[in-house]
Image (cartoon, rainbow, N blue to C red):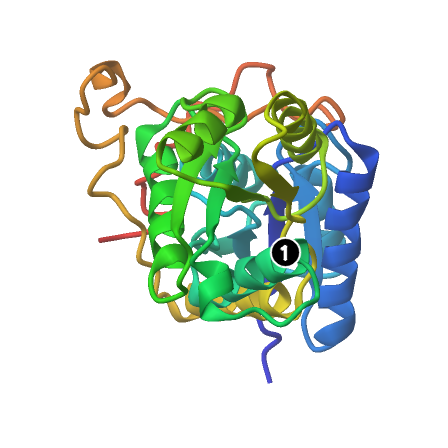
Amino acid sequence: MTTPPALLIAGHGTRDEAGAEAFRDFVRELGRRHPELPVGGGFIELSPPPLGEAVAELVERGVQRFAAVPLMLVSAGHAKGDIPAALARERERHPGISYTYGRPLGPHPSLLRVLERRLDEALGSVSRTPSDRADVTVLLVGRGSTDPDANAEVHKAARLLWEGRGYAGVETAFVSLAAPDVPSGLDRCVKLGARRIVVLPYFLFTGILPDRVVQQTQGWAAAHPEVEVASADVIGPAEELLDLVMERYREAVAGDIRMNCDTCVYRIALPGFENKVGLPQQPHFHPDDDGHHDGHGHPNAHHHHGSHAHSH
């Protein structure tokens, strides 16, 4: 019987050690749950181990086929470009390996269930009634990106979270690179009549940016004592997240990849982003990488819509 392809988890990376350790723990837990699979994980930037090191370790264990899953909620530049480019570079470094590439995680119904649970926890342990929820406005806060498609995905998650759950509304804000920021998002909730707001971070694990969301929320709340404001927790290593990664793995192995290209800045000329159409994608060079490169990207690090990323 042939060994199934290895599961390679690609993380963004964080300067927050607890956040990086949460990712590493998550990868270890997946390995424990699936002893039949070689499982490894690494980061694109900022924290160890780099993705290249994770690939090298798996190759040393005899792995030749990989299914890579980006541990990311939305498809921005990292999932669209950096990871496929990094994988192309690994194929240059390790002739004979092959891989398929899975799609980002959200907005999946199982993650929406986790978000709903985080909201209930933030609202307190009293039993939630429909009238209770009708009083609550949620501010879903995403990472924020220079990619409009990625920001739109956060709005999509917000809409899906609102549908059928009975909250007064689910608004969106971003912690960096995109408007509205957290204070502006909270102002908007109040203009819409909110009296109770729960700020819900759209993040997988703890880190510098989710901490910033909490700090900005507390700062705003102190200046607006008339509004009840609570902070919800990040998604965390929930059962649903562990299961979803395996679903994305199985999808990648089966070749059933459906990437959204309809509003992708690398494919479609969106207003203000026309210069990005057709841009070749380069890998990030992780500071801890081992230097098997010439320092400025390999010319074969193709654009994310190349055959190694997915096909239409």
Along the line of sight, which residue is nearer the eye, 303 or 96?
303
Q: Is residue 62 visible?
A: yes
- Choose between 274 and 99: the one closer to the eye: 274
Residue lying furthest front: 226
**Quadrant in which the N terminus is drawn:** bottom right
Is 63 located above or below residue 265 in the figure?
below
Is residue 148 toward the left or the right of residue 40 in the image? left
Q: Which residue is mark 1?
A: 123
The quadrant where residue 217 appears: top right
x, y (%) of residue 162? 38, 56
Residue at image point 81% right, 45% down: 21
Q: Is residue 77 left or right of residue 261?
A: right
- Image location (x, y in percent) of residue 84: 46, 40
Within-10-Å neighbours for mark 1: few <14, some 14–19, many 20+: many
What residue is rendered at 57% in x and 25% in y?
Answer: 284
Q: What residue type is disc 1 on? A: Leu
Residue shown at 50% from the left, 68% from the top: 110
